[in-house]
Amino acid sequence: MTEAPGPRNLITDVAGLRVGHCHDRALRSGVTVLCADTPLRAGVHIMGGAPGTRETELLAPDRLVQTVDAFVLAGGSAFGLDAASGVMDGLRKMGRGFAVGEVRVPIVPAAILFDLGNGGDKDWAQNPYAGLGRTALDAAAPDFALGSAGAGFGATTARFKGGIGSASWVLASGITVGALVAVNSVGCVTMGQGPEFWAAPFEHDAEFGGLGTGHAAKTPLTKLNREATTIAIVATDAALDQAQLTRMAIAAHDGIARAIVPSHTLFDGDLVFAVSTAGRSAVDAPALLEIGHAAATCLARAIARGVYEADAMPGDQVPSWKARFGDTG
């Protein structure tokens, strides 16, 4: 088998996964949900200095609950964590969740990015994120939008608009690996003043313009008092346990470092969830190394795709890549 992206080049090439978005144009923010028909094994690793999370502690290998029902990526800073409540409501109605006597408690880890300073209307009377989360869950499907959608709707980077990105890779063994990311970083995703992406060495088939590599000029740091954080999910159909998934999440952070300069800063809350559908057999240590490397590569590609696909909108505080270099890609 020749290694290549899956048929969608999305995280949902890992069979059984679905992704849904919901965003509010006036709010200039949104929510993205990843779920499946059955509970998922998961791990997490956080490298940013300003994370905002919910239910991440239970993903450690020594915790009682070994599977989760859905994941939430949301804008809104700490307000966005309420999106998980809306997702929990929807899952409970479906009969999903960890059984505690006669009650089921859906397990929904969440991570947020800071987009409160992006010019949207944040003067709400009631926190809107629970409703956005519920709608995103209901919209979950194998195919989904990239760029200005869901949790990436109001995202930015140091130079251009951020967004939702995704990519996949099928290894020679048949194992599928995928990544989903909301890009909202202090650092730059492109090199110097040109259109070339830091992730260019890992691009497949011109998926973000086929521009090659450019001149790596000094990177501006313009977002220190504004919005930041890149949050991601990497997934595989290999039957990994929580300890192995934690290692996969750690390895995947290399993808953030390859695609965003600088990354993992004090002002970012960079986080990676790792997910297994356990659709294939367990793996040995060399295979786990290969899966981790594929996860990092997919994540680097997904980050570039999220910026590449973002759309220009009235009121943008930074331009979209398309608006600046649309005729180049």
Image (cartoon, rainbow, N blue to C red):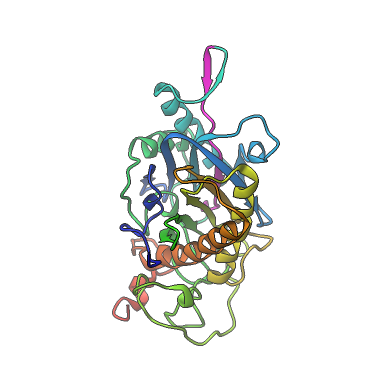
Look at the picture and state if 237 lies above or below 129.
Answer: below
Quick one: quadrant of the C terminus?
Answer: bottom left
Residue beneath the point at 34% across and 73% down = 205
Q: Is residue 202 left or right of residue 148?
A: right
Percent coordinates x, y for residue 306 in the rendering = 41, 62
Q: List the single residue furthest toward the top.
A: 102
Look at the picture and state if 243 lies above or below 69.
Answer: below
Q: In this view, does 122 lie to the left or right of 322?
A: right
**Magenta residues, start to end:** 102-116
Percent coordinates x, y for residue 104 in the rendering = 51, 20
Percent coordinates x, y for residue 41 in the rendering = 54, 40
Residue beneath the point at 62% across and 61% down = 225
Quick one: quadrant of the N terminus?
Answer: bottom left
Which of the two residues, 264 or 40, is positioned nearer the viewer here?
Answer: 40
Q: Is residue 165 left or right of residue 189?
A: left
Percent coordinates x, y for residue 50 in the rendering = 66, 53
Which of the two residues, 40 or 132, is positioned nearer the viewer here?
Answer: 40
